[in-house]
């Protein structure tokens, strides 16, 4: 379990380092509330993706282990028997798969599936068997660990039994139940491992740094509002006053200009009288 914890820590650290190298690309500058909500979604997606990638690594190990029919060195997945063959005068060795109960209390053969596990019993000094709450054993030690829980470590009686049975020299402190943890007492170790042993992923957001990095050269905004009747009247009066002022400035100048230069456009019409001459000749 310590090795799994170290592996989860390394995976998380590498994922965070890679995440910090990514850039946030947006089409326009976001306000603080929108920025915080976007970053929160990104962080949650990052955590889910990291957990999924770590879980796939565990699944690959399971597939390789099951596909190659690996035999546990503890003898929990298979047991071997040898019988003397009088015909061949040999001792052939036969491998038989162990069987364990699955989640539906149905027997599973380790050759078919390695998910089956059974409860663990410990015998005290008086040869009395006691079930250890939360402890399981199965085809492989990792599968048994993932199916187990930490319930025993919350119980002083259970820890005392373990110390007596296994002669543990170290003093193990009893875990305290707290509401701050998102993992319940009966949460399987497999669930905790796949969630990278993380209680909460804290992230700090720096909106000021984001704003300064994306500082715009100019800001344009539009205010849409409905004009009041007083504003409309004031605007019309202002337009009329401006028009009157323009007329006062333009019309006098136009009249003076016309008077000064109007004669240039006058036509001078000369009337030539028509004389009728009647000549009478008398012979």
Image: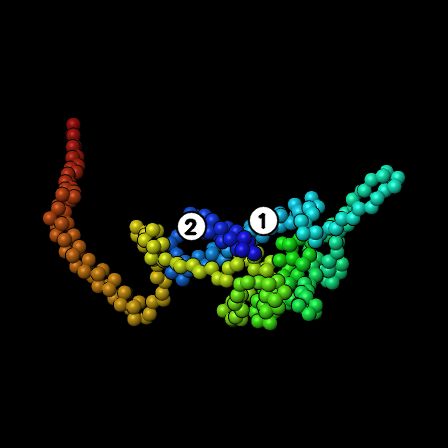
Q: Nearer the viewer, mark 1 or mark 2?
A: 1
Q: Is residue 238 visible?
A: yes
Q: Earlier in the sequence, mark 1 or mark 2?
A: 2
Say which of 133 and 271 sits in front: 133
Quadrant for residue 167, please give it.
bottom right
Taking the view exactly as shown, the residue that stands out farthest to the front is 125
Residue 190 x %, y %: 60, 58
Residue 92 sits above or below residue 228 on the image: above
Say which of 246 and 72 sits in front: 72
Q: Residues within 10 Å of mark 2 (few under 14, many from 20)?
A: few
Q: Quadrant of the N terminus?
A: bottom right
x 16%, y 30%: residue: 281
x 82%, y 40%: residue: 90
User: Is 230 placed left or right of 17 in the picture?
Assistant: left
Residue 194 x %, y %: 57, 56
Residue with the mark numbered 2:
20
- Display coloring: rainbow
Residue with the mark numbered 1:
57
x 62%, y 50%: residue: 59
Residue 86 x %, y %: 88, 41
Quadrant for residue 127, please give it.
bottom right
User: Is 71 placed left or right of 193 in the picture?
Assistant: right
In the structure shown, which secondary structural element does the residue marked by tag 1 occupy? helix
x 59%, y 60%: residue: 189
Say which of 149 and 155 sits in front: 155
Residue 198 sits above or below residue 277 on the image: below
Question: Residue 92 has which mark?
Answer: none
Disc 1 to disc 2, C-alpha distance: 23 Å
In the structure shown, which secondary structural element does the residue marked by tag 2 occupy? helix
């Amino acid at each position: 379990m310590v090795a799994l914890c170290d592996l989860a820590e390394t995976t998380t650290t590498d994922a965070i380092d890679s995440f910090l190298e990514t850039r946030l690309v947006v089409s326009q500058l976001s306000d603080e509330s929108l920025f915080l909500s976007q970053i929160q979604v990104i962080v949650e997606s990052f955590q889910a993706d990291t957990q999924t990638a770590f879980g796939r690594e565990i699944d690959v190990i399971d597939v390789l282990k099951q596909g190659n029919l690996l035999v546990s060195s503890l003898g929990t997945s298979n047991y071997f028997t040898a019988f003397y063959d009088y015909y061949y005068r040999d001792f052939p060795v036969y491998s038989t798969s162990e069987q364990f109960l699955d989640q539906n209390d149905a027997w599973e053969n380790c050759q078919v599936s390695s998910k089956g596990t059974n409860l663990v019993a410990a015998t005290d000094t008086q040869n009395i068997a006691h079930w250890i709450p939360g402890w399981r054993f199965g085809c492989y030690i990792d599968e048994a660990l993932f199916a187990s829980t930490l319930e025993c470590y919350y119980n002083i009686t259970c820890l005392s039994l373990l110390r007596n049975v296994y002669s543990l020299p170290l003093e193990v402190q009893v875990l305290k139940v707290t509401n701050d943890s998102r993992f319940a007492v009966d949460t399987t170790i497999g669930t905790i491992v796949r969630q990278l042993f993380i209680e909460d992923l804290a992230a700090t957001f720096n909106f000021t740094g984001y704003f300064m990095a994306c500082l715009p050269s100019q800001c344009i905004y539009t205010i849409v509002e409905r004009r009041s009747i007083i504003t409309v009247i004031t605007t019309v009066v202002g337009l009329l006053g401006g028009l009157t002022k323009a007329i006062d400035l333009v019309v006098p100048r136009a009249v003076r200009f016309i008077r000064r230069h109007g004669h240039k456009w006058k036509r001078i019409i000369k009337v030539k009288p028509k004389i009728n001459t009647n000549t009478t000749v008398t012979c």
